[in-house]
Every structure is written in C-alpha cells, then in structure tokens.
Image: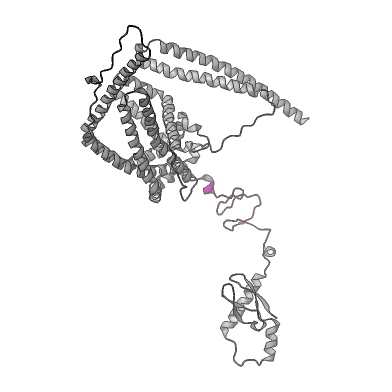
Amino acid sequence: MPVKVRCQSCEKVFAAPDAARGKLVKCPGCEEKVKVPAGDGAKSGATSKPASKKPAPAKAKKDEHHDDHEHALKNLDLDGVEDENTRVCPKCGQEIYEEEVNECPACGLNFETGLTKEKQKGIDPKLFFRVVIKNSKQFLLENKPLAIRTGIYTLVFSVLNFCCLFMVTWCVSFPPRMFWLGLLFVTSMVPNGWLWFLNSEIIKATMDKRENMPRINFDMFTCVALGIKYMLWRIVMGLQLFFLTMPAGYFNSRQMWIPALALQAVFELILVLMIPQVMVHMTMPITTRGWLMHIQFQAWAKSFGASVYWAAITFVVMLPSLVPVGLAFAVGWKGANEFAGTMAYNFKTNALLGADLAEVVAKKNNPKKGEAIQEVPVDDPKYQTKPLPWKGAIIPMVGIVLSQAMFGFGAVFAMRANGLFGLYYKKHLKLDTMAKDIVWLANDPTVPKRKSAMLLIKTGAGGIVCALPLWGVKWMMGDEGGNLYVLFSLGSFVLGIVILAIGSILMATANAQRDKLVKQAARAAKR
C-alpha cells in the first residue's frame, strides 16, 4: 500500500509507493530528498530477500539515528514539557524567583509596560548634538527633489512678486493698482507658506520615525494661508514683546536708527531661537502653546542650548545661498539703488496722474453750473515717467537667481534638524498631542450662561489688549498724536475692565450653579 510521507523542508504531504520503504525519494514540491519509513513492508521484503553479505555503511547508520531523533522531537508535546511553576523573563530568560517582582533584575524589563529602563526614560536629549548633522545630511541626500522643488517655488514666486510690484508702479488708476497690490500680497505669502508646510511635514515624519517621506504636493492656496499664519504669528509675538517693538518704533519715528536697529535685531534673534520649538508645537493637534511667549521662555530652561545649536547650524548651511546675492549687491549696488529709485519715482508720478484724472472724471459726472472743467495735461513734465535702468539691475537679479537655486538645500537640511529637535526634546516641550474631550451635562441650564459669560470675558480682555498698543502709539507719537488716542485707549481700557468684571461674576455664578446640580445628581444616584 502507498505510504504517506511529510517533507521536512516544505511540509508537503505526498504518497510514496510501498516499494520505497526505507529509501530516499524526491519531494514533488521542493525536490528535496525525503526518507520513507521502513514499516512492515520493508521487514517482509527483508525476509523474502537474502541478507546482503556486505554490512551497511556507517554513514547510513548515522543518518537513521539522526532521523530517529528528529521523529522523537517532532512528536514531543511542548505544552506538557513546559514548567508552568517557574517564572522566566521573556526578554533575557532570567528566572524570577519572587512573585511580586515586576522588573527583571538582569535586563531591567518592566513586565507591565514591556519596556526596559532605557526606553522608559525616553531618548536622551544630549544625543541630539551628536546625530543632528549626520542625520540631516543623510536626509538631504535622500530627498534632493524636495530641495530642488523648494528652490524652484521660491524663485518662481519671487519673479511673480517682482512682476506684480512693477505693475503696481506702472498702473495709473486706483482699481487696477489695488488689484495688483492684492496679487503682490498673495505672491509674497506663498514662499513663506511653502516653507511652513514643508517644515511641518518633515517634522511629523521625523517624530513618527518614518523611513521614507510621504508624497508632498504643492497647493498654492494652502501656502497662502500658511504664509498669512506666519505673518500673524510674528504680529502676536511682537505684541507680547512690546517692551522691544514699541521702543524700536519710537526710535524709528525719531530717526534714531542705531537703537532702533539694535532692538529690532534682538527681536528677530528671539524669534529665530524660538522657531524650532514653535514649529514642533504647530504640528500638534493643539497649537496654542506655539503662540504664547511665556511658554517658549519656560521651555528654554532645558532646550535653550539646542535652540542655539540649531540656529548656528541653520546659519552655516544657509550661508552659501547668501553669498551670491551678497556679492551681486556689493558689486551692483549703485545700479540696484538707481533701479529702485526709478520705480518709486514712477509710482508717485502715475499715482499723481491717476488722482488728477479721477478728479476730472468726478467733475464731469457731477457738473456744477458755471464751473469750467479743465482736462489734465498728460504731456506735463510732472506726469512723465522715467525709463527703468534695466542694465543696472542685471547683476543683482543674477545673484538672486543663484541664491534661490541654492536656498532649498539649506532649508531642507535645517527642517530635518528641526524635526530631530522635536524628537529628542519631545518630553521637555510638553506637547499637546490630543485634544481634550468636551463633556456636556444633559439638560444643563447653565450652558447658555457660561457661554455668555465667556464671551464677556473675551470681549473685556480684548478691549484691554487693544488699549495697550494704542497707548504705545500715543507714546511714540508724542503730542502730535492728539487726544484721540488717549480718549479711545482709556475708554477701551475702562470698558474692558468693567466687561471683564461682569463676565467673571456671571461665570462664577454659573459654575456654582453647575456644581450644585452635579452634587444633586450624585446624591440622587446614591439613593
């Protein structure tokens, strides 16, 4: 009868002829040699045939002995052999003799969390200084298309921005000038928005420890929105650093350039040092911490050195892209200055011509009796524009193009370093990784009151906040500002305090009523 045999290599079961007992046959699945068990057929065959005079070779005996051991191990019941009374560490195999111990004494594995001591502590932030340059360089080499795309996008929209600026100076009437001003604003927001978007994606991929970057598509509307977000972030940070921005504005209005530039440089330095931790907060579901200056100052207690190191690395990698434009403007600064002055002169001339033409058109549309309407003398020298000196702007333009072509590589390098900053300093930044669930009580009559009180509190706080910059404007303008700023700011401040007090009282009343309802519900549940 055929014999069923299981191949040890591919686990395929096949039927071998009865005559193959005790012999080696090829497996039809993997063509490995499989020995067929001897069984009864081999014994009967052995009795019918005379025994061979030559003894079996020693190698064959060794193979049979090895197969017998494999057969014994294969039929061994591992569940029955396991010692269930002995506790063993799943990581290193160390025997645990005490039942209440939750940590392996050999490797430090915590049996509840499944983590060793090193992993429970998290990544050592000090390793950031060792790996940031090498890792960022490797990332840049693997993602050259992102650097090339960044350079192309910034160059294209810089050219479009210049074209819109030229059209603003060239237009005579007000409506088309406002149209080109709008396009000028949009094209100026795109490069900053793309850098914000790409930096956020690289930070997310780095902190998630992804091996490959996801596909990143360019969306102009997203970039414009993020560019506006960056501009608003600078304004919010400037309001919180009013002790720097307001004196700088005052010195600037008094044409005291040195102290104004010094304060502005300090303000820009603070923003640059805050960028790595702010951008990490901006990638979280809740970005509130990225807008608060005191939160960033608190985080600096443990991450200031890394922030300075990141800023130094960014300056070094960006320096090659600044060399071409710096040299170009150093060589052709006269031509660039003449070109910019001509554009400003043409803008004033066309604006004057447009205003006079609009006045004449308004008089024609609403004529008055006895009033003579004179046409605008377009040939008047005060309405004549100057030709642009394009030759003087060639060298600066070439420098700008070369700098934009090199800019993307340094930017991607710095973005990867920013992602590593977030990865190694995640614990110190206190990130809001999840939004808190808002639980509403059923049939809670205090909900409308709480909403109204919160609205009053926000309104009052807004009035107080608005009053402070107005006081600053009055202080910078001196007596020339008049009493309007004083009255408006004082009224806003007093009204804000009154509204804030009313809102706080209503909020406290609503909270007390809500706590009373919760206690009543808890007592009813106990009964």
Q: Is residue 447 left or right of residue 268?
A: right
Q: Is residue 185 magenta?
A: no
Q: Is residue 60 left or right of residue 240?
A: right
Give the quarter of the figure containing the N terminus.
bottom right
Residue 11 position in % (x across, y down): 62, 70
The residue that appears at 63% across and 22% down in the rendered structure is 448
Foreground of the two, 349 or 42: 349
Most distant residue in the top direction: 370
Most distant residue in the front direction: 369
Vertical placement of residue 197 versus 450, above or below:
below
Res 311 → quadrant? top left
Q: Is residue 219 left or right of residue 76?
A: left
Residue 424 visible somewhere in the drawing:
no
Foreground of the two, 344 or 52: 344
What segment is highlighted magenta in the picture? Answer: 91-119
Residue 329 position in % (x across, y down): 24, 35
Is most of the magenta stretch helix, strand or loop?
Answer: loop
Residue 386 visible somewhere in the drawing:
yes
Residue 14 position in % (x across, y down): 64, 74
Give the quarter of the figure containing the C terminus.
top right
Q: Is residue 39 left or right of residue 396?
A: right
Vertical placement of residue 349 versus 127, above or below:
above
Res 259 → quadrant? top left
Residue 452 position in % (x across, y down): 60, 21
Q: What's the colour scheme?
A: one colour
Foreground of the two, 346 or 403: 346
Foreground of the two, 161 or 168: 168
Number of numbered callouts drawn: 0
Res 221 → quadrant? top left
Q: Is residue 116 magenta?
A: yes
The residue that appears at 45% across and 14% down in the rendered structure is 489
